[in-house]
Amino acid sequence: MAAWIARAHVRAARTDLAMVVVFAAVVIFTAAHGSDFATTTTINFGLFTLLTASLQIMLGFSNQASLTQVGIYGVGAYVAVYVETETGVAMPVALLASLAAGAAAGLLLALPLSRLREHILAMGTLAVQVILSEAFVHLTSLTGGVNGEAVPDALIDSVPVMATICACAAGVIIGLNHFRISRVGRRILAVKADETMAASIGINVRWLRLMAVAVSFAVAAGAGCLFTETAGFISPDDFTLTSSLAVLVAVILGGRSVTWGTLAGAAAYSVLNAETTSLPGLSDLLLGIMLVVVLGYLPSGLTGFRVPWQRVRLPYRAPRASGAADSDPTPQGTAAAAAVDACAHKEPHTRPRILPRKW
Amino acid sequence: MSAVTAVEPAALRVAGLCKSFGGVRVLRDFELTVPAQPQAAVAILGQNGAGKTTLLNLITRLVPADAGSIEVFGHNVLASAARHLAGYGVARTFQNPRLLLDETCLSNVVLGAQSVRRRRDGGTVAAMHRAAEALERVGLGGQTGRIAGTLPFGSRKLVELARALALRPRLLLLDEPAAGLSDLEESRLAEILTGLTDAGITLLLIEHRMALVAATARRVVMMDGGAIVFDGDAAAAIASPLVRERYLGAGFDQVKPERGKLR
């Protein structure tokens, strides 16, 4: 019975496997390479993937643009450092604290922000990011101000931390891949497509949007906690509006797909950043140029061409009327099944989409 | 059986409903009661701007009401949110179908089938069966795997109807189901709608095609200036001088009102 649903997840599992292979290959290559530069680059890539994935939860699933992801990442980082220095607990406990703080911040902010839509919501979240940046500088008793905070027992540029971060990034992407197929995932995609329609078929639009923000912020804050483990030192300079913009650009660059799009956007940004470390600001410039090019010529992003076969498909076969094992009493038996099968193999529209699509 | 407890709440009871958009009064003290028994189709006629769609949007809580009360099966609609309506047994379609055009017909209908959770409903597979059944009911049983965006307009409307049916409504609100349909599609739709009332669903449909109205609706209500000006059966509506003057036109003689058949 549940085989049909299982089949949808099995189909998605091919993407999971690809994700595991990609991240494992990156980690193994970096470990074999052994240089600090390679390790730092991979760590940044993993963290940035987490941030991109966190924004995908908001933008990709519920069409809520956010410019405050890195601010929340900072909240997660400061909470982790605070918890670790005050109570001396281990990193996993601090991670839980960060996740909780992120989710709480999401719920708190989503209540006023839930009335906003589209670019006005983006402006609202931009304001939140600015407030958070200022708070990091001025709440000196909690954050150490511009002098920053040292992280106790950090493992700077270590391979195990890199592997952990990459495993988390792969895990989050795999989670999103399967969430997309789930009941709630498809409902939130319906909210993204058309809120009026979603409400008319009994979907709780407000709640789903709220949960998207909470989960998104929790992931971002969790990434912040992981960041502290590898940074050794955090300061407000790590959590600026520019970085938040970069996350948004990476999502747009990557495209609509929550799996390959997230990966492609994060990879493009990380490579760009690593290659231009000697010239600060150049990566932002290049990112801007890439964004203009992508918006102009490839509006569904770097992975946009994958869209026709990235659709959520629920593999379904009508029950057989005479099947002894399958006792579903649907009257239209084999004829319907034959008709469904006949149609299932037609793939009417596989041409690539070139028109801009709504996010 | 005592007279007090036997009274079943009406499928729809609208009383004193008022709605203005800025200075334009769309509905003024609007009254309409649709009994739950017997299940039948009620058609709402009226010129453009008479407030028909606004009435539907008010009933489904897509726009807030200014004053008045709306009850469906005894539930106070104005104290509920749009998403509660499905749980009360109300579903609707839109004049222009609102579907997820990138997804298959089945995925679209499954959204409806999974929307309201009832006991002994089973999981997603059972919802998929219900969705396939709903598609079968509107004559799209062979199109489950088709991407909704590749269907012609008329079929998209039927997919939306199937999605509404998958909610297992007792009261179905249809906003111009025949608008944009070919004659053949329209006569198929008439058969489907007649089947729905026979299956015990009360229909409230806004419609301009008199052929469809005559074929499906047992009661016809005409709105003008935000209130009901005519209430009777389809034959009486076509014969009524008031309806002819304000809506149909004096030369109207195209349909023979015969339930279940067109032309």
Image (cartoon, coloured by chain):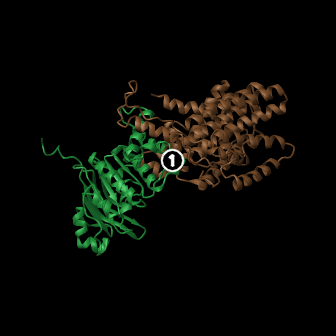
Q: Which chain is green?
A: B
In the rendered view, tell whether residue A140 sits above or below residue A282: above
Instruction: Determine the residue positioned at 84% across, 33% down.
Output: A37
Q: What quarter of the picture does the N terminus of chain B occupy? A: top left
Estimate the x, y position of residue A179 in percent, counting from the top left. Answer: 55, 36
Estimate the x, y position of residue A198 in percent, counting from the top left. Answer: 46, 48
- Seen as rendered, the residue at the extreme right is A278
In the rendered view, tell whether residue B67 sits above or below residue A319: below
The residue singled out by tag 1 in the image is A191
Label 1 resides on the chain identified as A
Q: Which chain is brown?
A: A
Closer to the camera in the image, B43 or A270: B43
Is B262 on the left or on the right of A300, as rendered?
left
Splitting the image into 4 quarters, where does residue B27 fall?
Answer: bottom left
Is A288 on the left or on the right of B13, as rendered?
right
Q: Mark 1: which secondary structure?
A: helix
Estimate the x, y position of residue A116 in percent, counting from the top left. Answer: 55, 53
Instruction: Give neighbour class at mark 1: few <14, some 14-19, many 20+ (Cα, 10 Å).
Output: many
Estimate the x, y position of residue A294 in percent, counting from the top left. Answer: 71, 52
Closer to the camera in the image, B180 or A227: B180
Is B127 on the left or on the right of A276, as rendered?
left
Closer to the camera in the image, A96 or A135: A96
Q: Amino acid at mark 1?
A: Val
